[in-house]
Image: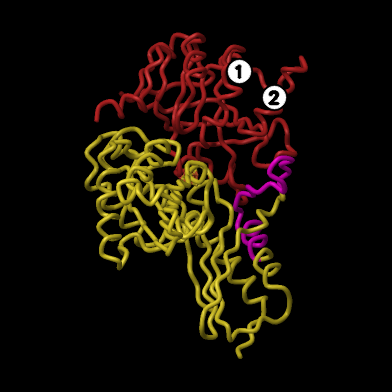
Chain colours: A yellow, B red
C-alpha cells in the first residue's frame, strides 16, 4: 500500500492546467510544421503560419494558445494499491483546477447549471474519468476542451449491418458539418463500440493519444489512415478557408459491444488539441 | 487581396470588400458573445436602450482570457459566430455593419448582411495569443457581471481578418467547398 497525500494531486493538476494551455505537445507541433510545408492553398498557408506564430507567442509571453481554455477534462488512473490521504480526491482535483485557472490567468468558462447559467468563476467542476488499474501509481491526464469543436461532436447509434462503411460515413458527415466552426485543421477522436456513453468516452480518450501513433489493431490503423485521407480531400482547409489540411489525425479506439449495436462516438477537436500527462 | 480598413466602417468601404480578402482592421470595435447578445436582445424587446451604439460599428464575437499585469488583454481569438445567428439580423437592421467571428452563418444572417450592406469577417480561430497583439486597449463598458462575456470596447491596430460573407452575399466557406 502506497500513501499519496491529495495535496500532491492538487499541486500537479494546477501545474498541468497552466502547462496544457500554453504549450502544445511535440506531436501536435510537428503536425503543424508538416502542414505548413504541404499546404497547397495560399490563404491556408497564411493561416497555418499564423498558428505557428501563435504557438510561439503563447509559450514565450505566457498567453494561452486559445482564449477558450476549455472545460478541464481529467482522466485519472489509480493503482489499486494506492491510498489517498489528507482529504477527498475529487475535491483535491477540483481545487487543482480552481488554482490553475485562477493563478494561471486562464478563462473561466463553466456555468453552474446548464439552463440557469451562472459562471462558477473558477472553471470548476472538472469532468473526471476514473479508472482503477494494477499497481501503486497514479497517472493523470489533463485535457482542456474548447467548445467550438466540442459542439460539433456527434454520436451515431449505427446498426451492425451498417458496418465499416457506416462508420466512415458517420465520421465524414460529422467533419463536414463541423467545417470552419471547429477551427480546422482538426483532430478527430473516434470511439467505436461499447454503449451510448462508452463510445463517447473512448472518443475523448482517443484525442489524448499521440497523433503520430496509430492503433495497434491492423484494420483500425488502416481505417485511421483512410479516413484522414478522405477528410483532407474535403478541402475545408485551415480555418475552413479552403486547402489541403483539414485534419491532422484520426485517432480511433474500440471496445466490445452488444449483438444489436454499433455505437460510434466522434469527438471533434481543433488544432489546439491540448493534453498533459503526469505519473505520481 | 490585402486591404487596410478602419472601424467603425463606412458604407463605401464595405462595398469594396470581397469574400476572400485579407484585411487589417484599425480603430474601435466592440466585443459581445452569447450572454451579452441575449441581454441586448432582451433589452431591445423591452424597448430599452443598448449599452453600445450599433450604427456603423463592428462587433467581435470574443470572450478573452484574463490579462496578465501590464497587458491590455489576455488571449483573444474569435468564438463560433453561429450561436449569435438568432440575434444578428436584428442588430444588423439597427445599423451594425461588421461582425468578426469564426464559422458558418445562417441564411437569415446572410440576407440581413446583404439587405444592410454589411460584412462578416472571420479571424483565425485558435490564434488568440497572436490576435491579442493587435489589441492595444480594452475596457469593459457594460455587463461587467458577465465576466469574460462582458461588452468591451477595444482599440485595435492592424487586426487581421478575412472577409467571409461580403455585402453581395458571396460566402467564402461555400465557395471553397464547391471548388472541390
Ligand atoms: S475550437 Fe479550439 S481553437 Fe477554436 S476557439 Fe475553441 S478551443 Fe480555441
B75 on left or right of A192: right
The quarter of the image holding the C terminus of chain B is: top left
Element on which disc 1 rests: helix
Residue placed under numbered mark 1 in the picture: B91
Q: Residues within 10 Å of mark 1 (few under 14, many from 20)?
A: some
**In front: B159, or B82?**
B82
State the quadrant of the N terminus of chain B.
top left
Give the quarter of the image for residue A23. bottom left
Q: Is disc 1 in contact with disc 2, using a CB cutoff of under 8 Å?
A: yes
* Label 2: element kind: helix
Q: Which residue is mark 2?
A: B40
Point out the tag, 1 or 2, that comes first from the N-terminus. 2
Q: Is residue B106 magenta?
A: no
Q: Mark 1, chain letter?
A: B
Q: Which residues are magenta?
A: A96-119
The residue located at (65%, 49%) in the rendering is: A110
Amino acid at each position: 500500500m502506497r500513501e499519496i497525500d491529495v495535496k500532491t494531486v492538487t499541486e500537479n493538476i494546477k501545474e498541468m492546467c497552466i502547462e496544457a494551455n500554453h504549450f502544445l505537445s511535440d506531436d501536435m507541433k510537428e503536425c503543424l510544421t508538416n502542414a505548413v510545408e504541404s499546404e497547397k492553398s495560399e490563404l491556408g498557408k497564411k493561416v497555418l503560419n499564423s498558428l505557428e506564430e501563435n504557438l510561439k507567442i503563447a509559450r514565450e509571453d505566457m498567453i494561452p494558445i486559445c482564449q477558450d481554455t476549455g472545460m478541464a477534462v481529467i482522466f485519472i488512473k489509480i493503482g489499486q494499491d494506492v491510498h489517498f490521504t489528507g482529504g477527498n480526491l475529487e475535491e483535491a482535483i477540483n481545487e487543482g483546477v480552481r488554482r490553475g485557472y485562477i493563478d494561471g490567468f486562464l478563462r473561466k468558462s463553466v456555468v453552474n447549471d446548464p439552463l440557469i447559467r451562472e459562471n462558477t468563476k473558477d472553471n470548476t467542476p472538472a469532468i473526471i474519468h476514473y479508472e482503477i488499474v494494477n499497481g501503486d501509481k497514479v497517472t493523470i491526464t489533463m485535457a482542456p476542451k474548447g467548445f467550438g469543436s466540442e459542439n460539433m461532436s456527434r454520436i451515431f447509434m449505427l446498426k451492425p449491418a451498417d458496418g465499416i462503411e457506416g462508420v466512415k460515413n458517420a465520421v465524414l458527415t460529422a467533419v463536414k458539418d463541423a467545417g470552419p466552426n471547429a477551427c480546422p485543421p482538426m483532430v478527430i477522436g473516434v470511439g467505436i463500440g461499447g454503449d451510448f456513453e462508452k463510445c463517447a468516452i473512448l472518443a475523448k480518450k482517443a484525442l489524448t493519444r499521440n497523433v503520430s501513433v496509430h492503433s495497434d489493431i491492423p484494420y483500425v490503423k488502416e481505417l485511421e489512415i483512410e479516413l484522414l485521407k478522405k477528410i483532407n480531400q474535403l478541402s475545408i482547409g485551415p480555418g475552413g478557408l479552403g486547402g489541403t489540411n483539414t485534419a491532422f489525425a484520426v485517432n480511433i479506439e474500440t471496445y466490445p459491444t452488444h449483438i444489436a449495436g454499433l455505437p460510434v462516438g466522434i469527438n471533434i477537436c481543433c488544432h489546439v488539441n491540448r493534453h498533459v500527462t503526469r505519473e505520481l | 487581396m490585402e486591404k487596410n480598413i478602419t472601424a467603425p466602417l463606412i458604407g463605401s468601404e464595405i462595398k469594396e470588400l470581397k469574400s476572400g480578402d485579407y484585411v487589417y482592421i484599425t480603430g474601435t470595435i466592440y466585443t459581445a458573445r452569447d450572454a451579452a447578445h441575449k441581454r441586448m436582445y432582451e433589452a431591445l424587446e423591452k424597448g430599452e436602450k443598448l449599452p453600445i451604439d450599433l450604427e456603423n460599428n463592428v462587433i467581435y464575437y470574443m470572450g478573452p482570457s484574463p490579462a496578465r499585469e501590464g497587458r491590455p488583454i489576455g488571449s483573444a481569438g474569435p468564438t463560433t459566430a453561429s450561436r449569435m445567428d438568432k440575434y444578428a439580423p436584428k442588430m444588423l437592421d439597427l445599423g451594425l455593419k461588421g461582425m468578426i467571428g469564426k464559422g458558418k452563418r445562417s441564411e437569415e444572417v446572410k440576407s440581413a448582411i446583404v439587405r444592410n450592406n454589411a460584412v462578416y469577417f472571420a479571424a483565425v480561430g485558435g490564434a488568440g495569443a497572436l490576435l491579442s497583439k493587435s489589441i492595444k486597449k480594452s475596457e469593459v463598458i457594460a455587463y461587467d457581471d458577465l465576466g469574460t462575456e462582458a461588452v468591451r470596447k477595444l482599440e485595435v491596430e492592424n487586426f487581421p481578418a478575412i472577409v467571409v460573407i461580403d455585402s453581395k452575399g458571396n460566402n467564402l466557406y461555400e465557395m471553397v467547398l464547391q471548388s472541390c
